[in-house]
Image (cartoon, rainbow, N blue to C red):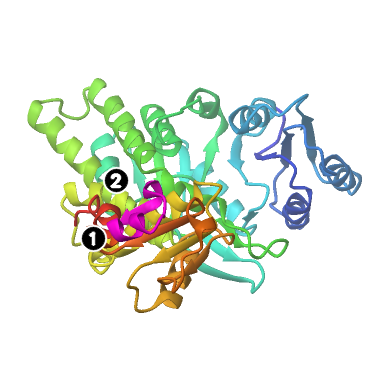
Amino acid sequence: MTGIKLSICIPTYNRAEYLRTALETLAQADFGFAHEIVISDNASSDNTAEVVESFIARGLPLLYLRMPENMGAGPNLTNAIQHASGEYMVYQGDDDLLILPRIPEVIAYLDANPDVGACHAPWYLYDEVADYDMSKFYSIDADLKFDRQDYAGMFEFIVNRHIFPEIAIYRMSHVRSCFVPRHFCFWPFSYLAHFLDQSAVAFLREPFYRSVAVSRIAPSREQAGFNDAMTAWDSYRGGLEYFLHFATRRGLMLRTEEAMALYSRTCQIFTALRMAVAVRFWVARNDYIRAYELYTRMAIAGFDDHPEVRDLRAQFPGLVGLQTLADKVNAMPEMERLIFSNAPDVAGLEATLRDLGLAARIQVMGDPAVDDPAWASTTAVLATTADKAAEYAARGYDPHFIFEEKDVVQAVVV
């Protein structure tokens, strides 16, 4: 026995200043038990090594591992875990923070419940600039413990409460067999299946982790978890299906045709509701094409009237059509201008198109009073009707670059 109670595993790559903040916080830790900080550096080219060495010099219980080259995120975390010596282990993002007073409380829970292999909790989204907790990623009403192999109870809990088991303190005796590579199946659901196969699993009500959503170092940066929320819905479904595979193969949940159909429908609903979150994020980025694609999948799942898309439905044809037009015009490097025929508000259309990504090099204008022959091969036209399109072609504009309104909206069905 090493006597180390907790290993705090921090994979990092080229984020020295974020890591400095994390270590400054950990330097204040007074847990009342021995702990170690295991940092695996994916061959950073910044001053990460110097930052770590400065904290080692200050006496932090730090084990610093440096990869010979960037091996990717998964191997970097694995490297930290395989070198860790604690009885328990917690993953910490190099830009996130532990809530230090809560850590001994979670360890005390694990000590008092030796049957528990993983102790989860929700986490705060934290504004480091204003120094306040913006929200919890999920909420539960009371501490819960699921007995070993209670897959049915756990599955119901996850899908009904939209629980994401990403933050936990783990019993190290289970970690190395449970943390195995997963690629298409959302790792928290997959790992949860592994832990539940070996032990009881707990969910505590109070967070012990802060995910920094607004960073003091880079206040305008996008929080990393947003990318998952915007793109990982099929991975979420894959993780749930992986979890169900474990349960049914172990004989702990039914595998009848009716039961399998119900599981599939439940996973579809869960995924559709996560897509609703993604729709909100894509709309915030003015990407209506992606938002519309998600809407079509939500509609098939029966959620075409969900609050996130209800008011968007009427807007989709116009906005998706304009974004499609912007994408087409941007794709042709010789384009210098875009004419809107019969447009009552060219300035308003231009403002919308810029928001939707129309390149700055493209001039937006209404019907020209005089045609310039030099424009023929460098101008795109949006015509309201087939007759108007024919008129512009007759005036010498290249027909390859003349679009009819119906052509840019007919692929949008709401």
Residue visible at 24% across and 46% down in the picture? 297
Residue 141 visible at all: no
Gap between marks 1 and 2 measured at Cα: 45 Å
Furthest residue in direction left, as rendered: 258
The residue stretch that appears in magenta: 389-404
Q: What is the quadrant of residue 140 in the picture?
A: bottom left
Furthest residue in direction right, as rendered: 57
Tell me if 44 is positioned left or right of 392 in this view. right
User: In the rendering, at what x and y percent does residue 373 appear?
Assistant: 50, 58
Tell me if 336 is positioned left or right of 68 in this view. left
396 magenta-colored: yes
Residue visible at 65% across and 57% down in the picture? 100
Three-letter amino acid code at the position of disc 2: Thr
Residue tagged 2 = 271
Residue tagged 1 = 387
User: In the rendering, at what x and y percent does residue 200 appear?
Assistant: 38, 36
Q: Which quadrant is the C terminus positioned in?
A: bottom left
Q: Nearer the viewer, residue 152 or 160?
A: 160
Q: From the viewer's perspective, is residue 112 above or below residue 273?
A: above
Pointer 1 with pointer 2, Cβ within 8 A: no
Residue visible at 63% across and 53% down in the picture? 96
Q: Nearer the viewer, residue 356 or 95?
A: 356
**Label for residue 56?**
none
Q: What is the quadrant of residue 133 in the picture?
A: bottom right
User: Within 10 Å of the Cα at label 2, are there few (<14), some (14-19), or many (20+) other Cα atoms?
Assistant: many
User: In the rendering, at what x and y percent does residue 103 appear?
Assistant: 60, 52
